[in-house]
Amino acid sequence: MEGIAGKTAIVTGAGRGIGRGLALALAARGARLVLNDLDQAPLEETAALTGGDPALTAGSVTDAQVGERLTEAALERFGALDVIAACAGYTWDGMFHRMTGDQWRAIVDVHLNGTYNTVRPAYAAMRELARAERERGGQPAARKIVTVSSMSAFGNLGQANYAAAKAGIVGLTRTLAIEGARFNILANSAAFGPIDTRLTRAREQQDERVGEAALGIPQAARDAYLASIPLGRTGTIEEAVGPLLFLASEHANYVSGALLEVNGAAHIG
């Protein structure tokens, strides 16, 4: 993808899954990185795999101070901020009539509030950078906000919390596309179907947890779900990262407010 080399990008959730895949793909194309993950160890693993020296900020995106620190790191370390990709999150599923308040709040907090916490300071900084460029007589450079939604945003059994949060991210992103247009800030979201990560693998075949939440899908439910997808399989990390790279690149300099579905044709019909 063109227009990524030399750009400064923040990636949250960079210690695992799609976030890690995106961080590595950006690094391979010459981006300067500010990386976040909940845990320090996987974050350092990603940093080592980049072959470079990214700035690292561990901590939960539910903490507003983490978002502030990410933007500060980009500006202080690299003097720029061109892309923010909000990839952090997990699932804590349950039928709505049994869903606890803790389940609801935890997932809305990490996905919707976490996106707000990390994107808001980055967006504010992007506005100021664009304003300064205009005051110097130039046109603001294209800057990108990339968020991660899900096909669950259209409704999904056992995921009322996740669906509500992911739908909220779409509304937030489209509003940023409108408000950011005069500053050449382009905001887009990708709605993923099942990508091969710890969130979509069979629960019986792994022991992955975030707090009280057991990650993954029960095998029987997973088999039925995959059978409903026209392509008949999960997507790979690389297949998820490609669309995000496009949205971060100069190929998407006239794309804003889009919801790019990446789901193996699962949402057709």
Image (cartoon, grey):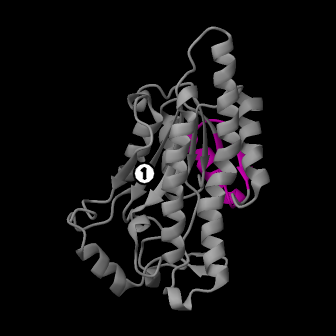
The reply to whether residue 54 is visible in this rendering is: no
User: Is residue 223 toward the left or the right of residue 50 in the image?
Assistant: left
Work out whether residue 67 or residue 186 is closer to the camera in this orientation and state it.
Answer: 186
Per the rendered image, the range of residues in magenta is 34-58
Inspect the magenta stretch and tell me whether residue 239 lies in it.
no
At label 1, the amino acid type is Ala
User: Is residue 231 toward the left or the right of residue 50 in the image?
Assistant: left
Q: Is residue 44 above or below residue 182?
A: below
The reply to whether residue 176 is visible in this rendering is: yes
- Residue pointed to by mark 1: 190
Work out whether residue 51 or residue 97 is closer to the camera in this orientation and state it.
Answer: 97
Q: Position of residue 266 (x, y in %)?
A: 27, 64
Quadrant of res 38: bottom right
Quadrant of the rendering where the N terminus is positioned: top left
Q: Position of residue 224 (x, y in %)?
A: 28, 81
Rendered residue at 34%/54% (across/down): 262
Rendered residue at 40%/59% (across/down): 192
Q: How many marks?
A: 1
Q: Position of residue 74 (x, y in %)?
A: 70, 35
Rendered residue at 59%/11% (across/down): 138
